Image: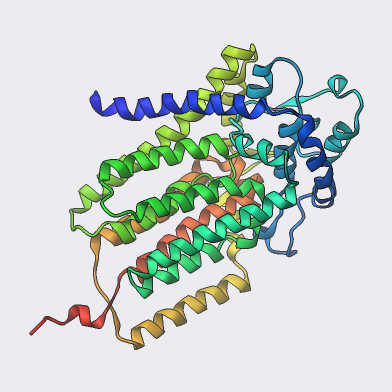
Amino acid sequence: MRRLIYPAGLVLAAWFTGFFLLILAYLIPQDRMMSSVEQSLLTLERFGGGDELLPGIPQTNLDYFTDITMVSTSIAEQGPLMDKVLLAQMCGEIGDAGSIRKYVYSDQRETLPLKTYARYWHGYQIFLRPLLTFINLNQIRMLGMMCMCALAMLIIVRVMKRGTALLIPQFALFVLPAPFILLINLQCYSVTFITLLMILILQSEGISRKQVVLLFELGGILTSYFDLLSVPGITLGVPLVFYYAVKREENHSWQRTCLEMLQIITAWLLGYGGMWAGKWIFATCLTGENVIDDALQTVKLRSGTTAGTRQVGYFETLQKNWDCYNTVVYKLLLIGLAVGLCVLLIRGWRFQLKKEMLLGTVLAACIPFAWYRLTVNHSYIHYYFACKELVIFFYGMVTAVFASLSKKEAFQRPE
């Protein structure tokens, strides 16, 4: 029973902390953001259709539809403070840049009809609203790019100390999801930042297993709080692969490794699902809207097998997402990784069997397949960004190969 106190307490503390931070964000005067949003309208309208930056490559879909929704929920305000904080009001139709323009230039905003998007926390508002009071959307993106690049460089510098071979999986991690899209889309910022920060923390010396479990629970909480169901599995799968490749050096039985991984995944799911449920409860109790029913109906839809007017299956969904990587570009990347492996082998690196590392990284790499099974409808319809979940699989497999390498000197016994 005591083992449940800390995890449950962390979720409850996150409920009230997240709620309080959103209240502070919505106390910022709306008018101070209008100038920045006005300067951002051209960008939002230009790419509002969600065009692919590089036609024919789904990973480069700009998905400004979601970015527009984020900006829309930042500036739309009507009624009591609790409605603003918990119902996530939007200027009009979801993803409609024209509704934002109409709202910005209206002299009677209080009379315009608003929609709500209440089932998510929209925790990104604690950053987006303050930033919009000073800078426009493109400047926010530039700031985000600089911060993400700094975190990525810091990770690479730290990994270099553990061996050259481990640099190759990190390179693959930053290349596979079309990195410039991660830098451009606000939708991807939360998942990317949470993942990078978790990897940095996992690199800390002396971090205990109990702290690792709590870290993954916190990762699930933050993902639920900030993300709009983009590729949430990334914050679980990628740090988990990294943990088994870099931090776990003890040799244990496969049963113990599986049990530990199950504990970590359960902690992440507790944080993710528990935090999300908190939003439904807060919004239903404090606004009078039945957000719980709306959320449960949406969960049922997104986990179902109906996409529009047709029935789709798990393997059809998996194929649709997998095909996003069935291109010449990614085949060339695979060839490049193979060449890099050959170079290391020629230079004296050899494979060394590390059972726990291999089991941990390969099992973590399978997380996307479980995610697609649980979210058939969502992953099929939104394949152009849901396909990024497969980054976990590719990263896990590449890591399993290159983390198994050791320098030839490591096999030689000292005289």
Residue 308 seen in render: no
Which residue corresponds to the image point at 79% horizontal and 41% vertical from the top-left? 37
Which residue corresponds to the image point at 35% horizontal and 88% vertical from the top-left? 346
Residue situated in front as seen by the camera: 411 or 149: 149
Residue 10, x across and y down, in percent: 38, 29
Which residue corresponds to the image point at 49% horizontal and 64% vertical from the top-left? 153
Decide if residue 176 is on the left or right side of residue 359: right
Residue 267, x across and y down, in percent: 36, 37
Residue 250 sits in which quadrant?
Answer: bottom left
Which residue corresponds to the image point at 57% horizontal and 42% vertical from the top-left? 376
Q: Relative to 59, does residue 80 appear above or below in the rendering?
A: above
Q: Residue furthest bottom?
A: 346
Residue 208, x across and y down, in percent: 25, 46
Residue 223 seen in render: yes
Residue situated in front as seen by the camera: 193 or 259: 193
**Which image quadrant: the N terminus?**
top left
